[in-house]
């Protein structure tokens, strides 16, 4: 699909959504989540968020990126720390004033995901 057209962006976005819904819980899915976020960041805002008014498309795209990051950091993957650092940098780049409360809101979920990752690794190591 052509990432330069609205149809292409929507098709790629749907494919990413399907993929993260299907395998996004895997321990090794961190790079997939990162690829999804990178895609959303690079997509033309009017193509990524066609329902938004043109003057609000950039803001709508940032909300999509934020949602993807927040989903990604709530999943116990081997890349959770790297994803959280990326998310932290994203929020501080958008608005330093809003970063602190937004990060504080997701931090408990990140801590739960980290604990679940630790337990998953322990169980995985017992199976080997």
Image: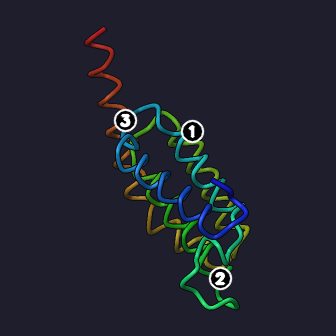
The answer to whether residue 9 is above or below residue 123 is: below
Disc 3: which residue = 117
Marks 3 and 1, how far apart at CA: 16 Å
Mark in front: 3 vs 1: 1
Give the percent coordinates (x, y) of residue 108.
38, 58
Tell me the mark number nearer the camera, choosing from 2 and 3.
2
Q: Secondary structure at mark 3?
A: helix
Residue 80 % position (x, y):
50, 42
Quickly name the residue at label 1.
31
Q: Secondary structure at mark 1?
A: helix
Q: Quadrant of the C terminus?
A: top left
Say if 122 sits above or below 38 in the image: above
Disc number lying in front (1 or 2)? 2
Q: Residue at x 40, y 51 (%)?
A: 18
Q: Mark 2 near mark 3, Cβ–Cβ under 8 Å?
A: no
Marked residue nearer the N-terminal end (3 or 1):
1
* Relative depth, front residue between 12 and 107: 12
Q: Answer with mark 1 or mark 2, whichever residue precedes in sequence.
A: 1
The colouring scheme, among rainbow, by chain, secondary structure or one colour, is: rainbow
The residue identified by callout 2 is: 57
Mark-to-mark CA distance, 2 and 3: 36 Å
Alpha carbon distance from label 1 to label 2:
26 Å
Label 3, residues with CA under 10 Å away: few <14, some 14-19, many ≥20? some
- Percent x, y of residue 115: 34, 40
Q: Relative to 49, is 94 on the left or the right?
A: right
Q: Residues within 10 Å of mark 2 (few under 14, many from 20)?
A: some
Q: Which residue appears at 35% of the width and 25% of the height?
A: 121
Quadrant of residue 56 within the rendered picture: bottom right
Q: Seen in the image, is 123 located left or right of residue 81?
A: left
* Left or right, 109 with reference to 86: left
Percent x, y for residue 36?
A: 57, 52
């Amino acid at each position: 699909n052509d990432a330069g057209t609205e149809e292409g962006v929507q098709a790629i976005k749907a494919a990413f959504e399907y993929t993260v819904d299907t395998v996004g819980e895997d321990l090794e899915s961190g790079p997939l989540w990162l690829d999804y976020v990178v895609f959303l960041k690079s997509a033309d805002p009017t193509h990524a968020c066609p329902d938004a008014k043109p003057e609000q498309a950039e803001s709508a795209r940032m909300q999509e990126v934020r949602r993807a990051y927040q989903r990604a950091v709530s999943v116990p993957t081997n890349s959770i720390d790297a994803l959280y650092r990326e998310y932290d940098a994203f929020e501080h780049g958008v608005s330093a004033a809003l970063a602190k409360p937004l990060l504080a809101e997701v931090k408990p979920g990140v801590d739960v995901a980290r604990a679940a990752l630790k337990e998953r690794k322990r169980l995985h190591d017992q199976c080997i």
